[in-house]
Image (tube, grey):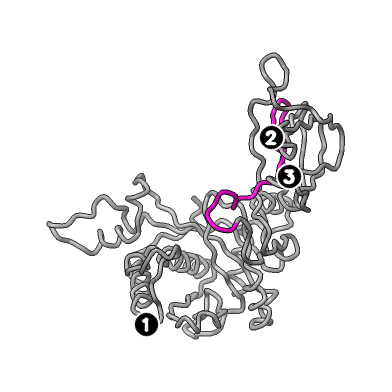
Amino acid sequence: MSEELTYAFTKEDIKEVINFCKSYHLEETKKGAGRTGSGPRGFGGEIDAFGPGKLREIGISKIISKLSGKDCLIDNEIYSNYKVGQNVNADIIKIKDNNIERDPNLYVEIKPFFQNDEWYGMRADQIESIERKHRDKLNNTYLIYGEILYDDKKNRKERDFLGAFLKSVLVDENYSFEEFSNITDIKCKIHYAFSLKDLKSLGHLYPKETIIPETRFRIAKQIFNKSGKLWKGKRKIKHISGEKNIKANTLPNGKVLDYGKFKFNGKAILIVDNKNKHKQYLFFEDKSILENKYFGTFKFQKGEAVSFNIRNKLEGFQGSNVKGIDDWWISRNRLDQLIDEGKFKKIHTIMKDIATKI
C-alpha cells in the first residue's frame, strides 16, 4: 500500500464524522427518508448513508495536507434542503497556510472509489454549475477518487466504522465491541485523480435517456464442441482478418451505437445465435485486438471467444433501464490506458501537482 497516498484515521476523525451526521439528523428540513422510499431513516441510517462520504473527504484532505504542508479544510456545514440546491461549493473550502486562512486555488471534487468501478466522471449539471459559479477555477478543477478500506483480517460485517468507534469509546464490562475493526485499521487510499479539463477532452458525454454500457466483453462458452463443430443454435457469418472496422449490436434491440464501433486487428470468426440474430460472438483464430475511443483496447489470445455485443448495465433492474441525467464519463479501462500512454498524469505526479497548486 502506497503510504504517501494513504491516510490512517484517528478517533478524532471518526468523532468529526459522527458529529456531522448528528447535526444532519437534527436539521429540521431533513426528513430522513431512505433512498427507496421505504420509510423514515433514523440516526443510524444517516450514519450509514453519509458517514463513508464524510470519512473519505477527511482522508483525502489529510493526504493533500500532508503533501502540501498546508491544512486543507472540508465543508462540514449542514445546509437546508433549499440551500443544497444552490450549493456548488468544492469539497475543500479553505486552506490554512502559516495560520492564515484563504480560499483554495483549486476546485476539488472528492469521489468514491470501489474495486468494481467501470466509469469515472461527473454529472453534466455539476459541470455547468462550476462553469457558471466558479468560472475562475474552471481550468483548475480536479476529481479525486478515494477508497475507504480496512487493513485487517476482519470480515465484511466486522469492518464497520461506527462499530470501530463504539469499540474505542464504550468501556463497559456489560458491552463488548471487540469483534469490530480498530479505528487505526481504517484507511483512505487515493487511486485516481484527473482534471475536469482532461475529462472533457478525453472522456465523453453520455446523455440521459440512453443506456449505461458494460465496459468489458463477456467470455463466451459453448461456441465450438470437442469435435470442432459449432454448438447447435449458432452459425458462422464471416471470417475477419487483418485491420477492419466492425460493429457490435446493442442488446436487446440490435441498434449500433457510436460506442459499438470498433477497430479490429487480427483473425477471428463472427458468429451469431440462430434464435436471436442480434447476439454475436467473436472466436479468435489468432492473437487479436479490439479498440475504440470509449472503452479502450482489448487484447485476445488464439482460441478465446467473447460475446460481441453492447449490453446495458441497467437491464433487469427495477425501474427505468435508461439513464435519467447527462454525465461526462471515462471508462476505467480507457483511463488506465491513457495513464500508461502519458495522456493522463500518473497518480503520484498529479497529486503532487494538486498539493503544490492548492
Q: Amino acid at mark 2?
A: Val
Q: Nearer the viewer, residue 3 or 343?
A: 343
Measured in 3D between alpha carbons, the distance from the residue under mark 1 to the one under mark 2, in whole angstroms, is 54 Å
Of the image marks 1 and 2, the number of the one nearer the N terminus = 1
Q: Provide the secondary structure element on which disc 1 rests.
A: loop
Of the image marks 3 and 2, the number of the one nearer the N terminus = 3
The residue segment tinted magenta is 297-320
- Contact between marks 3 and 1 (CB within 8 A): the answer is no
Q: Quadrant of residue 206?
A: bottom right
- Contact between marks 1 and 2 (CB within 8 A): the answer is no
Task: Write down the residue under mark 3.
Answer: 297
Depicted 55 relative to depicted 272: above or below: below
Q: How many marks?
A: 3
Task: Write down the residue under mark 1.
Answer: 28
Task: Write down the residue under mark 2.
Answer: 306
- Taking the magenta stretch, the answer to whether it contains residue 148 is no
Q: Amino acid at mark 1?
A: Glu
Depicted 68 relative to depicted 282: above or below: below
Q: Is residue 5 visible?
A: no
Q: Nearer the viewer, residue 138 or 73?
A: 138
Please identify the quadrant where the C terminus is shown. Answer: bottom right
Of the image marks 3 and 1, the number of the one nearer the N terminus = 1
Q: Nearer the viewer, mark 3 or mark 1?
A: 1
Mark 2 burial class by Cα count in 10 Å: few <14, some 14-19, many 20+: some
Q: Nearer the viewer, residue 259 or 264?
A: 259
Q: Quadrant of residue 216?
A: top right
